[in-house]
Amino acid sequence: MRLRILTPLSARVTLVVTLVAGLSACKPAPPPVAPTVEQRLQGTAPAPHLVASFTGLGATFVGPQSAISDSGVVPLSLRNPSDNSLAVGPDHIIQTVNTRTAIFTKAGGRFDSTGKVLYGPVNNNNFFRGFGGPCEEYNNGDTVVRYDQLAQRWLVVMPIFRRLQRRENEPPAPKAGDGAVMSTPGNADQPGPATPLFIPDAPTAEQLAAEAEARALARERRRNEPAPDGSFAMCYAVSATSDPMGEWYRYEFVRPLFPDYPRPAVWPDGWYVPTSTGDTVIEKHACVAERDRMLRGEPAREMCVIVSDAGFLNNADLDGAQSPPPAAPNPVFATAGSQLNGVLGGSAIHAWNFFVDWTDAEPGSERWSDVGQTRLERLPDIAVEPYAFLCGGQLTRCVPQPGTDERLDSQGDKLMARVVYRRIGGQESVVAAHSVAVDYDGSINVDPAPKYGDGGFNEAPGGGVRWYEFRIVQQERTSSEEAVGEADRVPVLYQQGTYAPGTGTYRWMPSPAMDKIGNIGIGYSWGTAETFVGQRFAARTPSDTLGRLSAAETVLVNGSAAQEGTLRWEDYTQTAVDPTYDCTIWYVGDFVESAGSSYSTKIGAFRMQGC
C-alpha cells in the first residue's frame, strides 16, 4: 500500500502518539505529541551558510605523502566504497576513506587557512606503526575517527577483518544471552608509552610497485597455506593531546566475531563501538572501551554484549561540552524490519540503554575482569510513521545515474552515522536519520521491495531523508515494568519528518547533527536519473514548525560524472560539530569529477541561522 496525505501542505500533519506509561508528576513531563511531515517542498528560510569547503581524499588528492613519478603525482589508489569519516578539532581536521587518512589545517588559533594538507595520504594503520601485531600489519577499511570534545582528544578505531592465527589464549565466541564479556587484550604490553605519529616520506613510483608486488606475493602465499582459524581484532589509537600530529596511545582487543561496520560513539563512561557480525546473520556486537584509562595511557578494558534479531546498532554520540546527567546509560537505536527475513521496513525505532560498570580494580587483580552490572537493556519500541527501506535495504541496485545503467546502493536498512546526542540545559535530544522510499509526489512509499541478494532493485521513484528528534525523559518503574529493570531514562518521539522535495529525486545516506542552540543540520547525497550525484545540506531552527527542515537546501558539490563498475556508494557520509564555537557543522560526502577514475570527496562547514 501507499500512504498519501491529501490535505493542503500546511495541514499535512499526522499525529503520532508515543505512549510513555507511569510518568511521575514530580519528574519532567514528556515532549508534546510529535507531528509527522512529508516535506515535498524546500524550505524558504535562508539556506545554511557554507563557511568553508575543500576537496578531501579521493581520485585527485595530492598531499605530502603522495607518490611522485617522473611524470608527476601518481593517482591515489582507492578502494570502494569510500567509508567516509570526519572529525574536527580546535585546529585540525582528520579524514579517513576506507584505507587512507589525511590531516588538514583548520583556520583559527594556529593556522590562517582551512584545508591545507599537513599529512597524507597514508594508510590507516600508520597510527599503529611500531605497535606490532595485526593493527600494525594490516591496513583496513571502515576506519572511523572521532574528536572527543569532553576530553579534547582524538580517537581512531580500525577493525581487523581477516582471521588471525589462533592465539594461546584464544577466547570462545560469545553468544546472545551470555551477558557482557570482557575482551582479551591483543597486546600484553599495551598501550606502552605514547608514540609520536610516524611521518613517512613520499613514496616513489618504484617503491609503490615493490609494495604492490610484495602484497601480491603475500596473497599467493596465503592461498597456498591453511587459512587461519583465530579471531579478528579491533584497534584503538588515542591521541595524548589535542594535537593529532603529536603522540598517540595504541590498544588492540581480540574480537572472536567479525567486527564489521563499527560506529564509535563518545560518552563520559566509555567509547561505545557497535559492530555487525556479518551480512548473512542477524546479530550485532555492542562493545564499550574504557575511555578514562585510555585517555591516561593506562592498561584498559573492553566489554561486549551480543544482540540477536536486531538491526544495525547506533550508540548515541555526544556533541558539545555539556555532559549527560551523572551515570546516565548510553542510548542505543536501530531501525525495525529485517532485510534477511524479507521485512523491508517498519513503523518503529528500536531502543536500548547500555549500562556499563567499570569495577574499580588494578590490572591483573581478580576483579580486573569483572564485568559487574554491565548490560544492554531493551526499551519499549518508539512508534514512528511507517517507512520502507530505500532500495529494499543494503547491497541492492536502486539509485539511478545519467548516462549509465549502473545503479547505486542506498544502505537503506539502517540508521546512518551518526546518531547524535545533545544536551542543552535540561533538554536532552537525540537526532537520527535514515533513507526511505518515496512516491512520485514525495509521499511515503511503503510498497514491498526486493529481498536482499535477489539482484533486483526497488521500483520506488524516489528516495527521501527520514529524520527524528527524540527527547530523553524519566519514566517511573512499576511492578508491571520489571523487565525494564533500572532503565528509567527513555527516549520518546518529539518530532519526525520525511524530507523529499522534487519529483524523481533521491536523497539518501544522511548524517545529522545539532548545534549548541538546537539547530538541526543534515547532509546527504542527492541525485536523479538526469543529474549526477552530489552532496547537499538542509537544516531547521528550534522555532520552526515541528517536522520541517525550514531552511533552503545548500549545495555542497555537484557531481560531474557517473560512478561505474560498482553499486557501492560511500556506505555512509558523516557530520562533525566544530568544538571551537559549537555552532559550525562539518560534513563530508562523495562525488565523481569529470572523467574521474574513482570518487572524490568534498568537505564543507555549515552555519545555521542564529548561532
Image (cartoon, grey):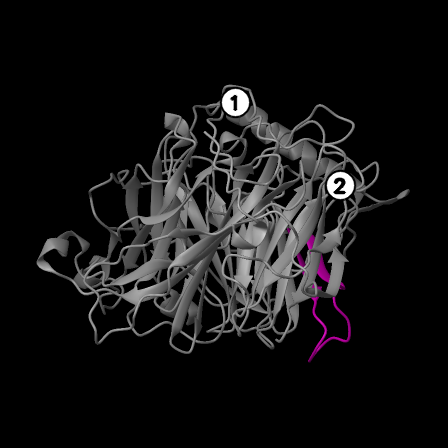
Is the residue marked by circle 2 packed among few (<14), some (14-19), or many (20+) residues within 10 Å? Answer: many
Q: In the image, is residue 209 above or below residue 477?
A: above
Quadrant where the C terminus lies? Answer: bottom right
Q: Does dot 2 land on a helix, a strand or a loop?
A: loop
**In the rendered structure, which amino acid carries the disc numbered 2?**
Val
The image quadrant of residue 335 is top left
Q: Nearer the viewer, residue 465 or 113?
A: 465
Q: Does dot 1 land on a helix, a strand or a loop?
A: helix
**In the rendered structure, which amino acid carries the disc numbered 1?**
Arg
Check residue 105 for magenta coloring.
yes
Q: Which of 545 and 225 is in front in this view?
A: 545
Q: Which mark is residue 520?
A: none
Residue 465 horizontal/vertical position (percent): 56, 47
Q: Residue 223 carries which label?
A: 1
Residue 418 horizontal/vertical position (percent): 50, 54
Q: Which of 403 and 370 is in front in this view?
A: 403
**Residue at the spot x=19%, y=59% of the render?**
373
Residue lying at the far left of the rendered structure: 479
Direction from residue 382 to residue 514 in the image, left or right: right
How far, Cα to Cα, is label 1 from label 2?
A: 35 Å
Residue lying at the far front of the rendered structure: 7
Decide if residue 170 is in sight here: no
Residue 94 horizontal/vertical position (percent): 63, 60
Is the residue marked by circle 1 packed among few (<14), some (14-19), or many (20+) residues within 10 Å? Answer: few
Q: In the image, is residue 36 above or below residue 347?
A: below
Check residue 545 for magenta coloring.
no
Residue 19 horizontal/vertical position (percent): 27, 55
- Residue beneath disc 2: 592
Specify the segment rendered in magenta. Answer: 101-122
Quadrant where the N terminus lies? Answer: top left
Direction from residue 289 to residue 365 in the image, left or right: left
